[in-house]
Image (spheres, rainbow, N blue to C red):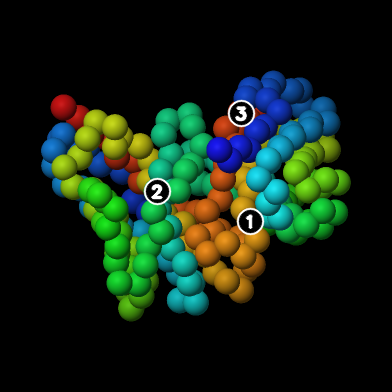
Amino acid sequence: RKEVEQDPGPFNVPEGATVAFNCTYSNSASQSFFWYRQDCRKEPKLLMSVYSSGNEDGRFTAQLNRASQYISLLIRDSKLSDSATYLCVVHLKAAGNKLTFGGGTRVLVKP
Amino acid sequence: DVKVTQSSRYLVKRTGEKVFLECVQDMDHENMFWYRQDPGLGLRLIYFSYDVKMKEKGDIPEGYSVSREKKERFSLILESASTNQTSMYLCASISGGGPSYEQYFGPGTRLTVT
């Protein structure tokens, strides 16, 4: 089983719609969680950290469910510019500063 | 503005050649990482370094070595390139102990081994 798993998609989303997707992690001792965004042929960049209580950044909402070992990302009012691959990232403190990346979920927002 | 640079965006090498990929960061970060990214497999950690002259194996170190002689520079070496090392290589850095653990990535080097 992979340490961090994501549905690869693509999620085809009409402009203005809401899309949500999850990421599961296998190590219950994982402590920090992040969503990175990667545009086509570009490097990954941090989108947002995921906090235990859930957090929001504009149209993006991230949530953590420790009991079921998954995190989620919800995008409201999707824009064409939201088209990208979203990488789920998990940090295990015992592993030092290593981050474990999921394979990514591809989102395509269409007019 | 933080910056991580990589020596080449595209590289084509022959099987058996020795390949050097260089990464430089200007943020005075302690930790630097080399990943490869392949379709369906995501980013996989090859090696990382948490200080000058220090290195740790990642998840897929076979066929690779690294060098960190200066804090700002982290080199990935393919001693004898093989076709299965054709991939996108990404370098990243992070400040030690940072609360957000934000990794800053370089633009990537797309290596093709023929």
- Residue A87 vs residue A1, the one in the foreground: A87
**Residue hosting label 1:** B95
Residue B105 horizontal side relative to residue A12, left or right: right
Chain of the residue under label 2: A
Secondary structure under badge 1?
A: loop
Residue type beneath disc 3? Arg
Residue at (81%, 57%) from the top-left corner? B54
Secondary structure under badge 3?
A: strand
The reply to whether the C-beta atoms of the residues labelled 3 and 1 are less than 8 Å apart is no
- Residue B46 vs residue A2, the one in the foreground: B46
Q: Are marks 3 and 1 on the same chain?
A: yes
Residue A97 horizontal side relative to residue A37, left or right: right
Residue type beneath disc 2? Leu
Chain of the residue under label 3: B
Front tag of 2 and 3:
2
Residue B41 horizontal side relative to residue A23, left or right: right
Q: Residues within 10 Å of mark 1 (few under 14, many from 20)?
A: some
Among the two numbered marks 3 and 1 on one chain, the one whose residue lies closer to the N terminus: 1
**Residue hosting label 2:** A47
How many labels sit on residues?
3
Residue at (83%, 38%) from the top-left corner? B79
Residue type beneath disc 1? Ser
| The C terminus of chain B, quarter of image | top right
Residue B14 spot, x, y in % from top left: 76, 23
Residue B99 horizontal side relative to residue A25, left or right: right
Residue B106 spot, x, y in % from top left: 60, 37
Chain of the residue under label 1: B
Q: CA distance from mark 2 to mark 3?
A: 24 Å
Q: CA distance from mark 1 to mark 2?
A: 18 Å
Residue A27 spot, x, y in % from top left: 48, 72
**Residue hosting label 3:** B110
Residue at (61%, 37%) from the top-left corner? B3
